[in-house]
Amino acid sequence: AVSYPFIIASVRSLAGGLWSSLGLRPGDVALVVAPSRLEVPVLHFALMSIGAVVSPANPASTPEEYAHQVALSRPVVAFAAPEVADKLPAHVSCVVLGSDAYESLSSAGAEAAPPPVAVKQSDTAAVLYSSGTTGRVKAVAITHRNLIALMCTHAENRKRAAAEATDAGKEPPPPAVTLLPLPLFHVFGFMMVLRSVSMGDTAVLMERFDFGAVLRAIERYRVTLLPAAPPVLVAMIKSEEARRHDLSSLLVIAVGGAPLGREVAERFAAVFPSVQIVQGYGLTESSGAVAGTVRPEESMKYGSAGKLGSRLQAKIVDPTTGEALGPGQRGELWIRGPLVMKGYVGDDKATAETVDSQGWLKTGDLCYFNEDGFLYIVDRLKELIKYKGYQVPPAELEHILQSHPGIADAAVIGYPDEDAGQLPMAFIVRQPGSNLTRQQVIDYVAKHVAPYKKVRRVAFVNAIPKSPAGKILRRELVQQALSMGASKL
């Protein structure tokens, strides 16, 4: 454990070394490739404090993926964990974290503080890489204005919660103890660290996600806030291990990375009635935030992503005609405001296709608002299954499948078919000891949906491939299905 004064001193001395020894200047991009260790957020803050640009990348990426990211963001230096350094392109200058060269930066900086740097709100603060679940990875430029607007929103939410508690004669919520099993290179983890520090909270970092370690950390550190993807809630519901730990300190679980189904939310609330489920929705291009359920009564709207964040505008647009749609009508969500990215680095064409001339960001998500202003995420437009002219949202089927007691995890894709176009196909991870059959899976879904949405094919697998943020990698499943051949399905 380290204190805030220690972190501030560490950031200042490292910033001095980055300036004087490495010669980093405002606008220079620094690639950071490491697991979620304590030195990583210190490095992030040190870089931003001198106007340099933080570009965190996944330490599990391949050399080819790093080459693509480097070609986009063009870093002048990379900071990498020892086990990753050899995978980076040879032409990028690399400082190995924990090495003598890295430690010497802080020593040098302690004697030579960097000069005051004028940073504009429009300057790029970070380059984050999109998940690449529906295409090749893009480099997303996030500005200081984006970060300021997001932190102001978090501060306002806490201030309002404190005022409402006082008005009700209750104690204001104490500073949170936040467990971060999220990767710090992903927008969710990156922003949660900034949130914790800006709020003066305690943050508990984990190098990688491990369900058992998460449970032990909640118990040991008396964690009050857990950011997590929906599969974590499913695991907590179904795992006997969760019952063996004291999780009584946990007050809030903040869900992001993928839509949380109503069935899963209701079952979680039944098992953990004292834990408030805060559903959030965002994307890398929106600084990780668009909507959320902030108040407790909003959190009871299970299945909803909450209400639009402050400072944002939104509209639902017919993806074919471009016509704005009303409440209850499904279309593509467009947003505008100070959380919208600066653009895609090195890809002006993609930027122009995603953000129009009036500043509207096209999210690519099929959504609708109800009459009360609550946002509901149906699915990714690109992931909708086209079955005989119908559109089938795979997320809807996944939520149903995950509610089955014999299913540990599930994913649904569109399997190519000459007659139907695509067939809904389910990949199922059975619960230990389950003897669930393909026909039982098909019948279970059929009881809950219209005939055109029925699952037509089933495959049992050991695990569902996912991104570090918990998003299903459907492209990998499509390739896996095609390699299986029809005889095995």
Image (spheres, helix red, strand yellow):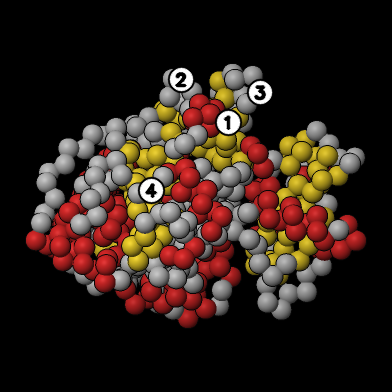
Q: Position of residue 119 (x, y in %)?
A: 21, 38
Residue named by callout 2: 357
Q: Which mark is residue 332?
A: 1
The circle on residue 75 is 4
Q: Earlier in the sequence, mark 3 or mark 4?
A: 4
Mark 1 or mark 2, earlier in chain: 1
Give the image quarter of residue 407: bottom right
Q: Amino acid at mark 4?
A: Pro
Dot placed on the residue nearer the N-terminal end, 3 or 1 = 3
Q: Secondary structure at mark 1?
A: strand
Q: Quadrant of the N terminus?
A: bottom left
Closer to the eye: label 3 or 2:
2
Assess whether mark 4 and mark 3 are in contact (beta carbons under 8 angstroms).
no
360 or 137: nearer the eye? 137
Q: Quadrant of the C terminus?
A: bottom right
Q: Earlier in the sequence, mark 2 or mark 4?
A: 4
The mark that comes first in sequence, 3 or 2, is: 3
Q: Nearer the viewer, residue 222 or 384?
A: 384
| Residue 30 in sight in this render | yes
Closer to the eye: label 2 or 4: 4
Q: Nearer the viewer, mark 1 or mark 2?
A: 2
Disc 1 marks a residue whose amino acid type is Glu
Q: Amino acid at mark 3?
A: Thr
In the image, is 230 to the left or to the right of 111? right
Return the x and y of residue 427 as percentages of the image width and height: 73, 60
